[in-house]
Image (cartoon, coloured by chain):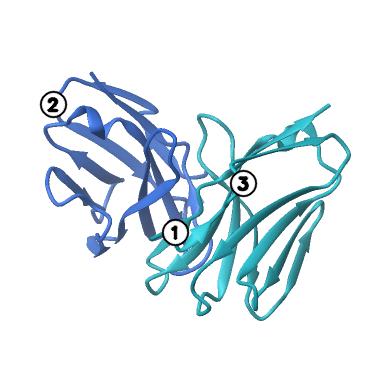
């Protein structure tokens, strides 16, 4: 049973607009969340993280929001750029941090 | 500061052969993780190692797969008697400690013919 879910397999956005990628999780005990970006034929690149003691973390054009009551987090990219076109994964450390469990990914396409 | 290195980047094996995938963690990182991404699927954890120790291998298939991280040298993921279903991208990640960000290598794409 998937503990982390990304329900949108793909998202298309115009350059300059906001991209919002969503992620839902099942376990209210999760206390740390990460976003990774992955280009084809490359490994995932760490993007941004958030601890459960916060509800927002910002780094340049990237902001992650955490809604603990809804067990939902989202990644906002603004303004979106064509170079942001990639697959985005949310991930959570589980089993005492022995591993990351990943969502299925959302493919973002930013059109010029 | 070099990132996580993996080699080879591409590996082709015939059914029944052995595949050896290598991973050198980032400098200063002593925790190594292996993940597999099957076609059209997300990344799935396989094994977590520290130097000379397997900490968690709950994601490893019971047979044919093994991993090590010796005192000297890279971590090795070994797949014996490969089958077509082993065709996937295998990613190694490393971290300075447990439980937080992991940094991934570029992956090894294994194709079994």
Q: Nearer the viewer, residue B33 or B69?
A: B33
Q: Where residue B73 sits: x, y (%)?
A: 29, 46
Q: Earlier in the sequence, mark 1 or mark 3?
A: 3
Looking at the image, residue B59 sits to the left or right of residue B101; the answer is left
Q: Quadrant of the C terminus of chain B?
A: top left
Label 2, residues with CA under 10 Å away: few <14, some 14-19, many ≥20? few
Q: Where residue A101 sits: x, y (%)?
A: 44, 59
Q: Nearer the viewer, residue A110 or B55?
A: A110
Label drawn at residue A8? 3
Q: Where residue A108 sits: x, y (%)?
A: 68, 38
**Kind of element beneath mark 1:** strand
Which residue is tagged 2?
B17
Instruction: State whether residue B43 appears in this view.
Output: yes
Q: CA distance from mark 2 to mark 1?
A: 30 Å
Label 3, residues with CA under 10 Å away: few <14, some 14-19, many ≥20? some
Vertical relation: B90 (above or below) B72: above
Looking at the image, residue A61 sits to the left or right of residue A35; the answer is right
Which residue is tagged 1?
A101
Q: Are marks 1 and 3 on the same chain?
A: yes
Q: Dot 1 falls on which chain?
A: A
**Kind of element beneath mark 3:** loop
Q: Colour of chain B?
A: blue
* Residue positioned 25% across, 56% down in the render: B71
């Amino acid at each position: 049973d998937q503990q982390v879910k990304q329900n949108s397999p793909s998202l298309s956005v115009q350059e300059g607009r906001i991209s919002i990628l969503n992620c839902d999780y099942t376990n209210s005990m999760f206390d740390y969340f990460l976003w990774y970006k992955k280009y084809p034929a490359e490994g995932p690149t760490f993007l941004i993280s958030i601890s459960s003691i916060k509800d927002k973390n910002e780094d340049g054009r990237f902001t992650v929001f955490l809604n603990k009551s809804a067990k939902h987090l989202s990644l906002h990219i603004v303004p979106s750029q064509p170079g942001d076109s990639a697959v985005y994964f949310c991930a959570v450390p589980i089993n005492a941090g022995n591993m990351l469990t990943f969502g299925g990914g959302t493919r973002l396409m930013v059109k010029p | 500061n070099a990132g996580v290195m993996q080699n080879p980047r591409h590996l082709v094996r015939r059914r029944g052969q052995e595949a050896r995938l290598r991973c050198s963690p980032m400098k200063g990182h002593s925790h190594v993780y292996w993940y597999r991404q099957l076609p059209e699927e997300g990344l799935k954890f396989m094994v977590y190692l520290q130097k000379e120790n397997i900490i968690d291998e709950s994601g490893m298939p019971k047979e044919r797969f093994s991993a090590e991280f010796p005192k000297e040298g890279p971590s090795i993921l070994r797949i014996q008697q490969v089958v077509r279903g082993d065709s996937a991208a295998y990613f190694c990640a490393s971290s300075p400690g447990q439980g937080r960000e992991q940094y991934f290598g570029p992956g090894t794409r294994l194709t079994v013919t």
